[in-house]
Amino acid sequence: MIFQIPHKTMLFALPSILVACSFNTQAQTSPHWYVKPTVGVSMLADTRATATNADIPNSLIGSGDWSINTDSGFYAGVGIGYQYSNGIRSELYWEYRTNDTSTETDASVQGLDGNIASNVFFVNAYYPLYQQRSWRIYLGAGVGWVQELDIDLEEGSLERSYSGDGDLAYQLIGQVEYQLSSGVSVAGELRWSDVGSPSLDGEEGGALGIVDNFDYTPVSFGLSLQYRF
């Protein structure tokens, strides 16, 4: 049997819920600057890409459809920010991530090993959903600039690289924080980013052409330490 809550009950309950949430987010704190290093695991879904004018003589890398299969990878970041008395935070954040890949091209169904990696700078803001004693729950969002995004393909002793930069990025963050002392706190976080469909140009190792029409939407699970000053 499925129980449903009447709409009128929901309408009457909603103000009470909002008041309770407001109460829990009113815990005041002294404004301060902070620095926050983070490490974690980067997750990236398999994707397909299109290579144009990428044919290389005597190579398994060429034009056409690419199938990029990814493994779990490494994620690290560091942020410097300011927390206001109401708990809201603004932050400049740099993140680096890398995931191993196996790429199948039209010329080879045997995957070419390599990796895909990125450097991105974000401006983030965090809103405290819940504050109670030493515990805090934050929801954050940000917009970023891609300093570099590249994919490397290993073929024999050569490593061919396709790289791009300058794209806009976006991210959403969920964070649960516990205050260890007056100056240090630890947090677990879930971070979802989206760089859209970037375009990468052939650069190192004799790589030719352009690789585009692929999704780069990594997710990371991280652990951070925040130091107040």
Image (tube, rainbow, N blue to C red):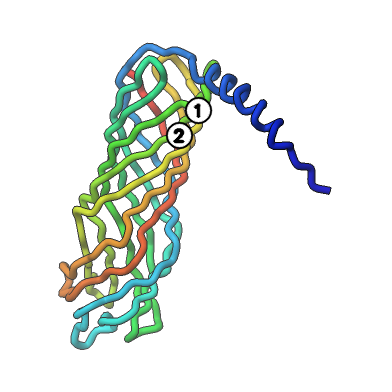
Of labels 2 and 1, earlier in sequence is 1
- Quarter where residue 7 is shown: top right
Q: Nearer the viewer, residue 133 or 123?
A: 123
Label 2 with label 1: CB-CB less than 8 Å: yes
Which residue corresponds to mark 2?
139
- Quarter where residue 58 is shown: bottom left
Residue at 59 percent across and 20 percent down: it is: 20
How many residues crowd mark 1 within 10 Å: few (<14), some (14–19), many (20+)?
A: some
| Up-down relation of residue 210 to residue 30 (above or below) | below
On the rendered structure, is 72 left or right of 2? left
Residue at 37 percent across and 45 percent down: it is: 171
Give how far across and how far down residue 129 sits, in percent.
50, 27
The kind of residue on which mark 2 rests is Leu
- Dot 1: element: strand
Which quarter of the rendered picture does the C terminus lie within?
top left
Residue at 27 percent across and 80 percent down: it is: 61
Give how far across and how far down residue 184 sits, in percent.
41, 21
On the rendered structure, is 172 left or right of 212? right
Q: Nearer the viewer, residue 216 or 184?
A: 216
The kind of residue on which mark 1 rests is Leu
| Up-down relation of residue 90 to residue 195 (above or below) | above
Give how far across and how far down residue 124 sits, in percent.
33, 35
Give how far across and how far down residue 39 sits, in percent.
40, 41
Residue at 36 percent across and 23 percent down: it is: 227
Which residue corresponds to mark 1?
129
